[in-house]
Image (spheres, rainbow, N blue to C red):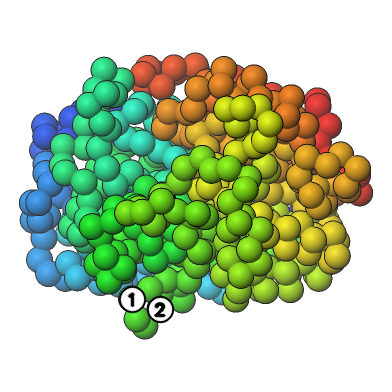
Amino acid sequence: MVTRRAHMSTLSRRTFLGAAGALALPSLVHAANLSDRGDTVFPFGVASGDPTADGFVLWTRLGTLPLLPGVAPRLPPSVNVDWEIAEDENMRHIVRKGSTPATAENGYSVHVEAEGLQPGRAYWYRFTAEGSQSQIGRTLTFPRDGQPTSSLRVAVASCAHWEMGWYSAYRHLAAENPDVVLFLGDYIYEHNAPPSRAALTVRSYGAPEATDLEGYRWRYALQKTDPDLQAAHAVAPWLPIWDDHEVKDDYSGIWAPAPEESIEAFSRRQRVAWQAWYENMPVRRTLRLPNGGMKIYRRAKYGDLAVIDLLDGRQYRSRQPCPVPPKYGDGRVISESCSDLEDPRRTFLGAEQEQWLFDGFRDHSKVWTIIAQDLMVASLRIPDQKGTGYRYWTDTWDGFHAARNRLTQALADYRPPNPIIFSGDYHSFFASNIRTRPHDEKKPIVASEILGTSITSLGPAYENIQKILPLNPDIKFFDSRKRGYVIADFSPRNMTARLMGITDIRDPASSVSVEKTYVIERGNAGLINA
């Protein structure tokens, strides 16, 4: 049986410090005055992702400093990059090595798809190029499908706005030594903070809103100079998906929020944004499509303990319900009388992805069914101004009632084992039970949802939502005042989720504490307050 202790060798102090920022920039830095360091072409760290039982993707991106918007790195068009994988943190027992080019055409990103390794164990890796050597990263292979497995630690993160705070949440997440990190969207923000939040800005993007490939590449590059983010990438493999800010706030399918951005123009913008996402994420080449698009929904299996379904909640969906011209792709609050809400023709996942997900629910070979997706599934009804009806926010599953009903009915019909949904986007902690029909406590619980707060992005007004929670009995916990992440520990008996809150995102050395803990017992639907 694979145990967490058996395949999760703890980083030594020296290796962890290397992962946490030996090659990183000073944390108190502005985009316009990054110090010029000529000793490395690896200013963005290293990462791994999309693990299987015999391999994973290794990632890095070459660059030179100082990092300035619109200024190309001082590198030839193609650079040879050597890579090594070892069984030990000192890189003495090399088990795989090779070379691959990093080209200007692909943003000098490197994706190595390693295979043929042993299941359920840790490996270490590094890159060498142009006389420089990267920091050492640590990654894992998953246990074989069906292999008896006793534990899994999952970290859940989302919504990291560079301008709104320091990334101490990533540093504390790395110290948890997760087996895998589920990143649920908004890795970057395409826009800058509005003037109304100038007093809250701790560091600037130093560039206009991203609309083209170079603009998106700049956002990722700046983001990845952060040493705490580098630590989180270097400690464990990631399974990332996107939400909206990787392209444009509140877009829905083919529709942009701005009426002046045509469907054709927005399609071009999506493709360059998705290219930049691929270039900067440790994901597999098979996610890329010949037409320049991407298909990011996928499934990972962790021994006999868990299956992880990763969803795309943006690309395939219908536009938000009952739009008000001239906007046709924008989130807002609407009345329950909107006929679009119950229209069965409208989709959240798209027909193909929806069927793929529901077909997966038929697999009962794992103890836990983990659904990782970007937007809140639980319903949050808001009283209307007269107090006689309800309103809903249209950008989450609350704007797609018929699609959510299909999801909850599929969970009821196929009964995938012990489903738990992890979500992001709302910049808040939510813990909810999911029923076949929201708000009806006579209906069965078919899943539970843990929505993790943001890394730094500011949340909605706490008091406004807190006062309407009595109208939403399935929501067991809410707090928008804290930034942070979630740590979920799975065993064959139960799942324990710790909601971790950062003390102060304006303090780069901020501490962290447990805000709330929930348990789900195997075979018993619903959250237990621990």
**Quadrant of the frame with the N terminus:** bottom right
Q: Nearer the viewer, residue 252 or 425?
A: 252
Residue receiving disc 1: 292
Whether label 2 touches label 1, CB < 8 Å: yes
SS state under label 2: loop
Q: Where is residue 215 in the image (x, y as percent from the top left)?
A: 19, 53
Quick check: 436 left or right of 400? right
Residue 200 position by quadrant: top left
Q: Which of 275 and 358 is in front in this view?
A: 358
Residue in the image at 36% along x and 36% along y: 161
Q: In this view, does 113 lie above or below 189?
A: below
Q: Which mark is residue 494?
A: none
Q: In this view, does 103 lie above or below 261?
A: below
Residue receiving disc 2: 289
Q: What residue type is labelled 1?
A: Gly
Graded by Cα atoms within 10 Å as few (under 14), some (14 to 19) or many (20 or more), the crowding at tag 2 reads: few
Residue in the image at 51% along x and 40% along y: 333
Q: Position of residue 141 (x, y in %)?
A: 60, 60
